[in-house]
Image (cartoon, rainbow, N blue to C red):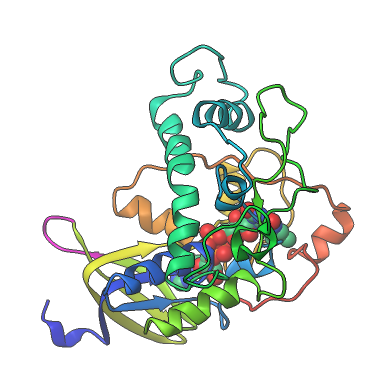
Amino acid sequence: MTDDIFDHEADVLVVGSGGAAFAAAVTAAAEGASVIMFERNDAVGGTTALSGGTAWIPDNPSLRAQGQVDDRDDALRYMCRMSHPQWYCDGHPTFGLPEDSYGLIEAFYDNGSRAVEYLTSVGGLDVVADDAVPDPSRPVDLGYGVTLPEMPDYGAELPEDKVPNGRHCTPGPGAPAIIEQLELAARKHGVEVLLEHRAVRLLQNAERAAVGLELRYRHLTVLARARQAVVFASGGFAHDSELVRRYLPGRVFGSCSTAGARGDFVRIGVEAGALLGNMGNAWWKQVPVEIALQVTLTAGRVDPVG
Ligand SMILES: Cc1cc2nc3c(=O)[nH]c(=O)nc-3n(C[C@H](O)[C@H](O)[C@H](O)COP(=O)(O)OP(=O)(O)OC[C@H]3O[C@@H](n4cnc5c(N)ncnc54)[C@H](O)[C@@H]3O)c2cc1C
């Protein structure tokens, strides 16, 4: 393959434009990489733009500023209990979880707060002024680190939950929604965002390393070359009936996720040799079946069709 067959080229290609994609793109760009984002919908934001926009972050900056200790071992115990009650075993070194599942939970505790602080520092989230050191006497000035003390954790009544309030973070007073903040930061760091570009295949070299993407733009096939990395942050699969039937327990007639949630990466990832995991979990909600059959986007709001 010669370079001139490519329509686009950047250090990092990011698929999707929800919270995960923008966080990856802003981080890569802030660290000096050139970045192109590809979004299959005709607007950015994905399910993130439809969401409540609240991020659950243990040991977050606001908690610390208020002098509240969110102990690692306690928080891990609570997350294991909530996430995998079928495996949970107090006293076991990984609380009964397989190593990889436990490792994910550890990574979340260890990096969640760091990610918020990092994105704040590069302008990706509603930021405190550079010289503003967290001040316990005025926690509402902490921008994204502002917590909602009135919103307790799920399972706050469990004895394992030692910090039932204060882990929910939301944009600060008057701050734009998370996607708007991240999009502004992405533009500031020179990230290019291309809409209506659907990734359909990962391009790999002879060693199976990712080197680019094949995409569809309207009726055209477009090729993009990645000099360093390809990041898939393309959300879920709730609007793909075949994947829903295969992976979700029970009968699911609709979803409030974005219309772009078609599980493209499930197929692309498997083709590239990825293992699948955690496919059967979702945030479940009941809606009248008569409505769900007619309106598969059950949030009831119209978002860009993917
Ligand atoms: C009503 C509602 C309320 C919610 N409230 C909360 C909350 O308060 N707190 C919380 O933590 N979670 C909440 N959630 C869940 C949360 O919004 C999602 O888990 C999260 O936004 C997923 O982010 P993401 O970046 O992984 O995916 P998304 O935001 O869905 O982004 C994925 C993007 O990738 C695009 N895409 C897919 N395939 C391709 C392709 N092949 N090529 C190019 N682009 C592609 C999609 O169109 C989409 O734009 C809520 C969800 C809903 C619907």
Between 68 and 257, the residue placed more toward the observer is: 68
Q: Quadrant of the N terminus?
A: bottom left
Tell me if residue 1 comes above or below residue 201 in the rendering.
below
Q: Quadrant of residue 239?
A: bottom right
Magenta stretch? 203-208
Between 211 and 30, the residue placed more toward the observer is: 30
Tell me if residue 56 comes above or below residue 205 in the rendering.
above
Q: Does residue 55 show up magenta in the picture? A: no
Tell me if residue 252 comes above or below residue 146 in the rendering.
above
Magenta: predominant secondary structure element?
loop
Q: Quadrant of the C terminus?
A: bottom right
Q: Is residue 252 left or right of residue 226?
A: right
Residue 282 place in picture, x, y as percent: 64, 45
Tag count: 0
Q: Is residue 216 left or right of residue 81?
A: left
Residue 13 place in picture, x, y as percent: 32, 72
Q: Which residue is drawn at the image coordinates 65% and 24% (left, top)?
A: 160
Residue 152 showing in the rendered view: yes
Q: Which residue is drawn at the image coordinates 19% and 58% (left, top)?
A: 209
Between 184 and 227, the residue placed more toward the observer is: 184
Where in the image, quadrant-wise, is ligand 1 located? bottom right
Tell me if residue 103 comes above or below residue 211 in the rendering.
above
